[in-house]
Image (cartoon, grey):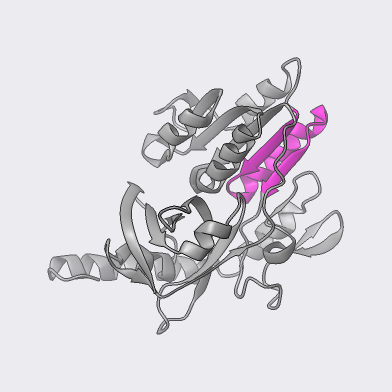
Amino acid sequence: MHRIVQKRQLSDEVFLLRVEAPLIAAARRPGQFVIVQADSEFGERIPLTIADADPAAGTITLIFQVVGHTTHRLAALPEGGAIENVLGPLGRPTHIEKVGTVVCVGGGIGVAPLHPIAQGMKLAGNRVVIVIGARNAKLVILEDEMRAIADELIVCTDDGSRGRKALVTAPLKELCERSPKPDLAVAIGPPIMMKFCAETTRPYGVPTVVSLNTIMVDGTGMCGGCRVTVGGQTRFVCVDGPEFDGHQVDFDNLMQRLRTYKPREDELHERCHLELGIARLEGRRP
């Protein structure tokens, strides 16, 4: 059991949990993730990136968006409650070194896994430019935390309610046109966003790393649910990633696979919202 020592709601459907996991906190490196099982009765296992860690306190920080049954259950857990199982750290850590100027681009919930990577790049001595984007101001997360890291921070929203009214690819293109151009780009967010970030940097020859969040069950390469095509070869996100060369990823195939369970996910999302509303009306915890 892993006790929740802090719970915070970052936006309507995005939550932060700081969880006791001393061995993971001590071993984790930027870019890695955990597999979480909210309870043994339901049994679903989901991957969540470690957004931060405090080895001294023995805690890790998980940030997630409520989209399905398990994330609804996690969001309903109280501060002081516990998560049944947390397995990790998993995946290959981010390759961090001093390269010069690094542009870190995060879209929506992708800002959470981007945070430790931006931290690591800054600590390595790089100049770090951070671009964060969301549909509107209410969905912008970790702005203060990113501002504390960045040499330059650019905030974009689709509707212009916060920062620039633009997609993240607009400032990314402008940064690529600077002289000198960035030495590296890191993009994390929805697959369509990462695809177009990679296409934005491609003509300028800026190496681009993306972090993929795929369907995943065991996190050890056994189930094959997380397979992706990179450079014409089959790779498994849980053991070969989650980070890959964005210019080599077959994003169209990835997005097609991610749509496999979407109707079922949407159905569960609506059902959980209904159950939560009924529970509140009855004055009980969901």
**Residue that extends furthest to the top in the rendered view of this protein:** 179
> At which x and y percent is residue 211?
65, 50
The magenta-colored residue range is 183-210
Residue at (77%, 51%) from the top-left corner? 249
Seen as rendered, the residue at the extreme right is: 232
24 relative position to 100: left or right: left
Furthest toward the bottom, the residue is 41
Residue 25 appears at what percent x and percent y? 50, 58
226 left or right, relative to 18: right
Quarter of the rendering occupied by the N terminus? bottom left
Is residue 82 visible from the viewing direction of this image? Answer: yes
Q: Residue at x 46, y 81 (%)?
A: 43
Say left or right for 282 vs 40: left
Residue ID at (64%, 41%): 187
Q: Quadrant of the C terminus?
A: bottom left
Work out whether 259 lies above or below 156.
below
Q: Nearer the viewer, residue 240 or 187?
A: 240
Residue 55 point in image, percent of width and height: 48, 54
Q: Is residue 180 above or below residue 1?
A: above
